[in-house]
Every structure is written in C-alpha cells, then in structure tokens.
Image (tube, helix red, strand yellow):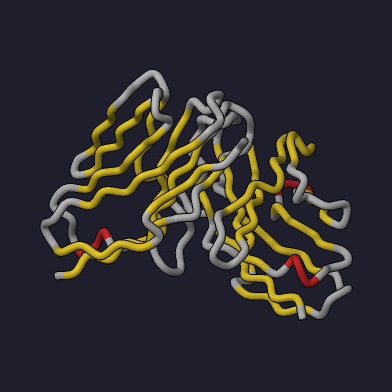
Amino acid sequence: QQQVRQSPQSLTVWEGGTTVLTCSYEDSTFNYFPWYQQFPGEGPALLISILSVSDKKEDGRFTTFFNKREKKLSLHIIDSQPGDSATYFCAASSGSWQLIFGSGTQLTVMP
Amino acid sequence: GPKVLQIPSHQIIDMGQMVTLNCDPVSNHLYFYWYKQILGQQMEFLVNFYNGKVMEKSKLFKDQFSVERPDGSYFTLKIQPTALEDSAVYFCASSQAGGGQNTLYFGAGTRLSVL
C-alpha cells in the first residue's frame, strides 16, 4: 500500500537539543526518500534525501537514517536552532513520477 | 534558490464555476507537477506534465481537471466545474529532469475555497 506514516504530528525542542522525526512505509518498491522543509508562506524545499542502497546521509546538522528491514526512516537535527522551526515532510518514491508524502511534523525550536 | 511562483495565493469561488490556477515554474525546468493538500492531510500527487503531455495522473485527477502550458507561459490547472471537495491547497512544482528521484521545486501554493 502506498502510504507514508510520519510522527510526531508536532514537536517542541529547546535550542541546542536534538530533534528526531520518524517515518514508516509499507511499499517495498520505494527506493528514494527525500525530506522537505516548509516555512510558513513558502513552498516545501528539499532538505536532504537518501536512496535505499544507503543507511545514512549527513548534511551539516541534518542526518537522515534509513532502515530497509524495518521500513523506517528518520531525520535527526543536532544543535537545533530557532531558525529550524518549520514543517518537515518525509516522502517516498519508487521511481515513478510521483512522490508519496507523509502528513508532516510541525517543529518548534524554543530559544 | 530557484523559485516557482503561484498566482493567486488564495482563490474563492462558487461551486460549479470554473477556476484556473496559475504556476510560473523555474525557467529551465521541463517537468511540471500539481499536488493537492486538504487541510491537515498530506500532499497528494495529482499530475505530471512534460512536453505538452500528461505523463502520469492519480485517481484524484478527475475528468473535471485539465492541465496545459501554452507556448511556454504559465503551467495551469483548470477545474471545470468545481465541487466542494476541490477545496484544498494546490501546490505546483517543477523539476529539471524527470523521474521520481529528481528534486522538485515547489511554489507556495494556492488555497482554493469552493463555496
């Protein structure tokens, strides 16, 4: 079934803390998993992505982990900053034209 | 970074009328998409468009929906006639290359309210 489940729906962390967002899926044909970041009034923008042949990808303070066996992925933000406050969407694709999106996590980083 | 512009940001329309949502994609992009997001739910794929043709569409892309990009101008989504369940935020996106592993650049969305 082509669904991507994302949790939590909302999350508040303190500045400097580590944020962890998670997603799970069922379709084993998914092989590409991007994370999109959306600020209020703007469109979602690609933050980081991972292919199913990898289990970890890092970009600065952002790291995404992929567990093929458990069909789970996660996004870790270390040293979270107030400027990271946004909505984060995980997504998945099996190589067709469409991305299957999760429902999003609204992150608030308190100073 | 590259910007996708969507016009208008909010559209209010009476049920049964026609509406056209406009999207100005990134200038050198060739692949165009529409996604629909009902309040509180995830974004869902509607359609992908390339070289003047619909490449793939979902079951949400009803017969009342159509897309076009005449002469390299706006990429448009037309709904005729509109229904109450069409109320949602519609996101346009574009990409330089095709296929599910390419970066999509999204606009800020058009909120459509059908009364």
Q: Which quadrant does the N terminus of chain A fall into?
A: top right
In the displayed structure image, the side of residue A70 where residue A99 appears, left or right:
right
x and y, in percent, of residue A66 in the image? 35, 30
- Vertical position of residue A103 compared to residue B113: above or below: above
Q: Which quadrant does the C terminus of chain A fall into?
A: bottom left
Image quadrant where residue A55 sits: top left
x and y, in percent, of residue B69 in the image? 75, 49
In the displayed structure image, the side of residue B69 where residue A2 appears, left or right:
left
In the displayed structure image, the side of residue A55 where residue A77 appears, left or right:
left
In the displayed structure image, the side of residue B44 where residue B114 appears, left or right:
right
The residue drawn where x is 41% and y is 43% is A23
Can the viewer see residue B28 in this picture? no
The residue furthest top is A53
x and y, in percent, of residue B21 in the image? 71, 63
Image quadrant where residue B88 sits: bottom right
The residue furthest left is A16
Can the viewer see residue A97 in this picture? yes
In depth, the one of A19 and A72 nearer the eye is A72
The residue drawn where x is 70% and y is 48% is B46
